[in-house]
Image (cartoon, helix red, strand yellow):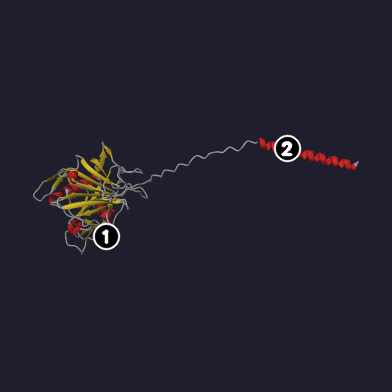
Amino acid sequence: MKKWCVLFIIVLCSLVACSNDEETTNEQDQEEPEEIVEEEPVEPEEPEKPEHIYPLTGLEAEEDVTDRLIAVMVNNHPKARPQTGLSQADIVFEILAEGNVTRFMALYHSHMPDRVGPVRSARPYYFNLANDYNALYVYHGAADHIENMVQSGAVQGLNGMYYDNDKVLFERSTDRNPPHNSYTLFDGIYQRAEEKGFSIDAEYQPMTFLEDESVEGEVATDISFSYGNNSVRYQYDETTEKYLRYSDGVQTVEYADSSPIQLDNVLIMETAHQVIDDEGRREIDFNSGGNALLLQQGKVQDVQWERNDGRIIPTKDGEPVPFVPGQTWINVIPTSPGIDGVELSNTAE
């Protein structure tokens, strides 16, 4: 009898176990398959705009920029080449002086070199530009009537004639002959400006700059024109994505180490020039606007130039054409032959 009881219990346990296994199997069969959730693609984050930029280059600054612009008259006579400090200028204006020789006005803000030069004498259309940009104007010498204009307040200027070789604002080099050997020392500019009661602080609105988009225009990587006997050429370097400059067939470089001048924008603007005296001095129209060529990223655009809040900018249909962030060279040429005399070609073909 005990034997049958034990057998009955074993059979009963087996039936219960089978029943549990069947229920478990049925529950598993009834479970719905897990829902597959498709992850949405992650869009790349847009790069953050810098909090502070230099107003003439659009390049990032570490802090709010309050230093005042400095404009320096730089000699471009063949005996003054190569010059010192042009590679660090935010903007360089190249304009005819007397004859067919140009002179530069270099604007400094994002970089302050140790010295710049050789420095040359003032001309009204240069210091008027400097005043429009609210810059301190550094020059060496001027005709009496021009110096009277500066001293009467046409611009806040520092004349090397009063500081010649003082080793604070100006220094004469021994490797060149006058008048091609006077250099301004940047450590002394703000010091001498404050001594004259000039402000060394200023606020500037940034110019219009490209962000990520490419520029428009036709491909042109080799550009040349002349100021009478003085020829200028720009070649686009696809490796650096910058323009190299040549004057009378010789590359424009830094005097100290022969490093090349490299530019992100070149604006060639035509405007009326008029000789006004027997010395060949000129008046140049910086108010009326006119035709221009804008070189950027190996391309050329036909644009207009305008004076906007005192500053020269390229426009299309009355709207500013953005600059590529970086350094700019502005060539001011007479209307005859004007931009029609500029030769454009594509050396990459």
In the rendered image, the residue lying farthest to the front is 349
Label 2 vs 1, first from the N-terminus:
2
In the rendered view of the protein, which quadrant contains the N terminus? top right
138 vs 113, nearest the viewer: 113
Q: Give the secondary structure at mark 2.
A: helix
Q: Position of residue 190 (x, y in %)?
A: 27, 53
Q: Position of residue 159 (x, y in %)?
A: 19, 54
Residue at (26% x, 38% y) in the render: 316
Crowding near the residue tagged with mark 1, few <14, some 14–19, many ≥20 C-alpha atoms within 10 Å:
few
118 vs 19, nearest the viewer: 19
Asked if the residues shown at circle 2 and circle 1 are in contact, with their CB atoms under 8 angstroms apart, the answer is no
Left or right of 46 in this view: 86: left
Which residue is tagged 2? 22
Check disc 2 and give the amino acid type.
Answer: Glu
In the rendered image, the residue lying farthest to the right is 1
Check disc 1 and give the amino acid type.
Answer: Ser
170 vs 8, nearest the viewer: 8
Q: Position of residue 207 (x, y in %)?
A: 30, 43
Crowding near the residue tagged with mark 2, few <14, some 14–19, many ≥20 C-alpha atoms within 10 Å:
few
Q: Is residue 15 visible?
A: yes
Q: Position of residue 140 (x, y in %)?
A: 19, 55
Which residue is tagged 1? 258
In the rendered image, the residue lying farthest to the bottom is 174
Q: Is residue 92 visible?
A: no
Q: CA distance from mark 2 to mark 1?
A: 90 Å
Q: Give the secondary structure at mark 1.
A: loop
